Image (tube, grey):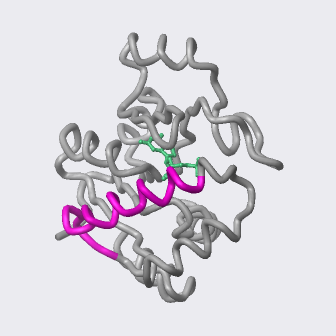
Amino acid sequence: MTNNNGLTVITGPSGVGKGTLVRNLLEDRKDIWLSISATTRPPRDGEQDGKDYFFLNKKKFQDLVANDGFLEWAEFAGNFYGTPRSEVEKKLETGRKVLLEIELEGARQVRKSFPEGFQIFLAPPSFQELEKRIRGRATDSEESIKNRLIRANKELEAQREFDAIVVNDNLNIALLEIKKLI
Ligand code: 5GP
């Protein structure tokens, strides 16, 4: 399957390394524009508003939902996350390659609105390894970790819905595979 409308989605369970991979990808692929999501989750240490996410309160998020301001949105581990619609549509109109790094429910919504988009699932080498990575990050509460592990199981079950599955065992190999796909 080919990537023919400029829109690529990367999904994968929390802790699989999507963030690191996407950062590395953007460093040498200036043709790709990464959408900045909005979230009601509090910022982690070092995260900046408008760079990592647009950090919104629930009311502001819900107003945007009501005004059709999101291309997709979902609840994840007790917080809301969404892709602001207008910037993505503008970039696609000018022919830019657009990348969304989102969770499963959002990916499913985008599949409906952009059936020609290309969807990549980033998988861990094993569930044990994923749990180790989530716990190793040590930035989330035990409750959030548990929620993320439950959610990870659900996401792993859905990987066959995607156009491509890339296993993130070795970062450089996964990166090469993704570069070939986009
Ligand atoms: P985190 O809290 O670890 O930054 O993100 C939690 C999950 O939300 C990750 O799987 C991430 O890909 C996903 N996510 C981030 N932004 C969005 C978004 O705009 N929409 C959806 N549906 N998921 C998102």
Image: 33 above or below 85? below
- Residue at 27% over, 72% down: 164
Q: Is residue 2 left or right of residue 28?
A: left
Q: Quadrant of the N terminus?
A: bottom left
Q: Would residue 115 be counted in the magenta stretch? A: no
Q: Is most of the magenta stretch helix, strand or loop?
A: helix
Q: Residue 63 in the image: x percent, y percent?
A: 48, 11
Residue 112 pos. (x, y %): 18, 41
- Residue 92: percent from the left, percent from the top? 37, 42
48 relative position to 127: left or right = right
Which residue is more in the foreground, 34 or 65? Answer: 65
Taking the spot 47% from the left edge, 82% from the top edge, the residue there is 174
List x then y, in percent, for residue 165: 31, 74
Q: Residue at x 53, y 50 (%)?
A: 34
Question: Residue reaching furthest right?
Answer: 46
Name above or below for residue 86 compared with residue 133.
above
Q: Which residues are magenta?
A: 145-165
Nearer-the-camera pick, 128 or 92: 128
Toward the viewer: 70 or 150?
A: 150
50 sits left or right of 64 in the view: right
